[in-house]
């Protein structure tokens, strides 16, 4: 017997209710299936990603929540403008930003993927980088122009050996001011 729910009915219910719990109650879909479908469709909201996601998606969602706290004027693209937007996470005064969270890998570097190959690249990448496991362990922020890395598939930052990327380190508490300054001078 076929399940009474489909990926389309689950996505439609999630867009309507905005809650994984309510979506599952409405459709009868188990949360572990709904979570996977919504995550793959990239429409799972930050709160649900934090509550139900894998460790990597939880950390990414926490970084997005931290950015929203630091830059209250930022519009979350997936929640406010278009569901399932693949190229960036936030729009601030017309400036697009893709949020990245990275802890140091076994070699000690922070590495993140760029948007090379995607239809649109962000204007900036904001990388939350930590030597610990999460934001609570302290972090550094790098605001890297997308145009500087548009030909790369990955960017690697060594936390102990300054390279060109260190020129783009910013104080997280200054991010809101930085974007207000950019609003006057960008685009």
Image (spheres, rainbow, N blue to C red):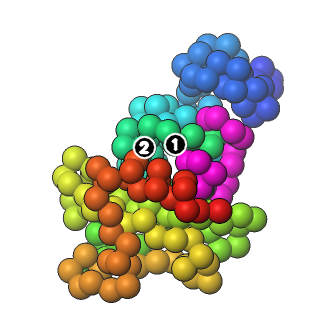
The x and y percentages for residue 168 are 38, 72
Label 1 and label 2: CA atoms lie apart by 6 Å
Q: Quadrant of the C terminus?
A: bottom right
Label 2 secondary element: loop
> CB atoms at circles 1 and 2 under 8 Å apart?
yes
Q: Is residue 156 left or right of residue 14?
A: left
- Near-viewer residue (70 or 134): 70
Circle 1 is placed at which residue position? 74
Quick one: 58 or 79, which is closer to the camera?
79
Q: Which residues are magenta?
A: 79-95
The residue that appears at 55% across and 48% down in the rendered structure is 92
Task: Say whether residue 110 is left or right of residue 18.
Answer: left
Up-down relation of residue 35 to residue 90 (above or below): above
Residue 9 occupies which quadrant of the picture? top right
Observer able to see residue 148: yes
Residue at the image position 54 percent from the left and 80 percent from the top: 148
Query: Within the image, what quadrant is residue 147 found in?
Result: bottom right
Q: Position of residue 21 (x, y in %)?
A: 54, 19
Q: Which mark is residue 71?
A: 2
């Amino acid at each position: 017997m076929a399940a009474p729910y489909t990926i389309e009915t689950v996505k439609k219910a999630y867009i309507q209710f905005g809650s994984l719990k309510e979506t599952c109650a409405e459709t009868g879909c188990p949360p572990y299936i709904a979570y996977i479908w919504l995550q793959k469709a990239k429409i799972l909201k930050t709160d649900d990603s934090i509550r139900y996601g894998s460790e990597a998606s939880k950390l990414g969602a926490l970084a997005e929540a931290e950015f929203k706290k630091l830059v209250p004027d930022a519009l979350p693209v997936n929640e406010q403008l278009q569901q399932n937007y693949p190229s960036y996470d936030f729009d601030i005064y017309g400036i697009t930003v893709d949020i990245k969270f990275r802890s140091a890998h076994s070699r000690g570097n922070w590495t993140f993927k760029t948007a090379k190959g995607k239809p649109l690249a962000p204007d900036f990448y904001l990388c939350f980088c930590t030597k610990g496991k999460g934001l609570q362990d302290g972090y550094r922020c790098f605001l890297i122009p997308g145009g500087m890395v548009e030909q790369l598939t990955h960017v690697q930052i060594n936390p102990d050996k300054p390279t060109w990327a260190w020129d783009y380190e910013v104080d997280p508490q200054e991010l809101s001011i930085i974007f207000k300054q950019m609003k006057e001078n960008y685009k």
